[in-house]
Amino acid sequence: MERERPDTPFVLLDRDKLEANIAAMAAFSRAAGVALRPHVKAHKTSEIALKQLAAGAVGVTVTTLKEAEVMYGGGVKNIFLACQLADSGKIRRLFSLGEKAEVSVALDSNEGALLLAGAAKERKRRLSVLLEVNTGLDRCGVLPGKETLELAREVMKMPGLRLKGIFTHAGQVYGASSPAEVSAIGRQEGELMVKTAEILRQAGIPVEVVSVGSTPTACVAGMVKGVTEIRPGNYVFYDAIQVGLGVVPAQRCALSVVATVISKPVPGRIVIDAGSKSLALDRGAHGTTVVEGYGIIKKYPHLTLARLSEEHGIIQSAPEGGREPEIGEQLEIIPNHACVVVNLADHLVVARDGEIVERWQVKARGH
């Protein structure tokens, strides 16, 4: 194992902060009395998933079937695929995985339910499903209340399917402009889900799981009485968007991109060897307006990472703004969106107490 610092740019993971973040969310879930099923799309890494399970997570959430297969290969046996399937090849793979692991899958249409039920009947199997409820993101999902009830009634008629519960992702929170708005969205998320679950139960439909998601809202929606599960993902790292939303201070961020200053061609312009292929062009999903530039430059908060080419980053400094880094100096940059940065890296370079101790392969990257 190479312990020296690799060539820049590379993705550096502070193991102490990672483990502290994992422990803190696990402690919250225990105190709130809700199950923790973290979303691994944030890290795509078996080592981190196993740490989450060891801390008390009941299983994991994935977005893609390949993520599910990688997680199973890494030792995870309880997996929720929070994405609809409408492809026969993927449905075959889902049932194949279900022969080895406890698997459940998202559903939000009668057409999708018929596809899954048909496959279950063909294989003489029963598949657990959760109905996705749209609580404001306006992506997938049926509306809370009546529409969810109508779909639930149809699913209950299909012997190949077991309706396990309902879930949502209030991703619209990333468009919030203040911590107060984050809290309001989280409360609404939890309350809409609890109310919808009660409507189903009053109609005689059992609801075992009432699941909410997103790192910014987890500790708000998770406190709403009647919510049974939270599915945060980004919390293992946190990033500049989470800092901008007021979720955590920058000191909690465990992931950074390390780059070298390679040029200072004119006053006020500093060039690094990390661009969009390392830091991504993400300025935040779903209307985020809380970030400036493409990351937070540690030790140089007065500098702005203003532009990215594929392999270059251009930092702007204001006149009389403070000390500038020198050519050859390495900078640590907290990315805007840690999840997409991890997906660009083959490995996470893991450090403890400032010393590189190991490297973890991002086995599900690109998937």
Image (cartoon, helix red, strand yellow):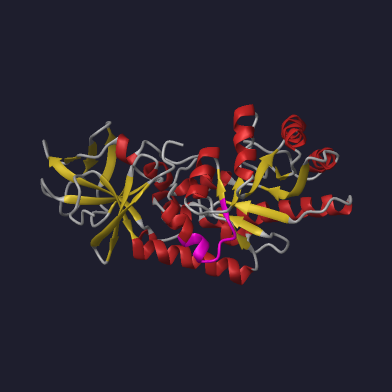
Q: Is residue 106 above or below residue 224?
A: above
| Quarter-of-image position of residue 113 | top right
Q: Is residue 300 left or right of residue 362?
A: left
Q: Name which residue lies at 83% across and 43% down.
A: 156
Q: How many marks?
A: 0
> Residue 360, can we see it?
yes
* Place of residue 237 in the rendered image (x, y in percent of width and height, measured from the top left): 41, 55
Residue found at the very far bottom of the displayed protein: 31
Q: Is 120 or 54 nearer to us in this picture?
A: 120
Does residue 234 show up magenta in the picture?
A: no
Which stretch is magenta?
51-60
Q: Is residue 236 left or right of residue 298?
A: right
The picture places residue 265, in percent across and down from the top left corner, at 11, 36
Q: Which residue is found at the position 48% from the left and 44% from the top?
A: 70
Q: Is residue 66 left or right of residue 282?
A: right
Nearest to the observer: residue 362 or residue 219: 362
Q: Position of residue 132 (x, y in %)?
A: 69, 43
Q: Position of residue 220 (x, y in %)?
A: 60, 60
Is residue 247 visible in the rendered structure shown here?
Answer: no
Residue sitting nearer the eye, 153 or 75: 75
In the displayed orientation, state which residue is furthest to the right.
Answer: 203
Quadrant in which the N terminus is drawn: bottom left
Q: Quadrant of residue 9?
A: top left
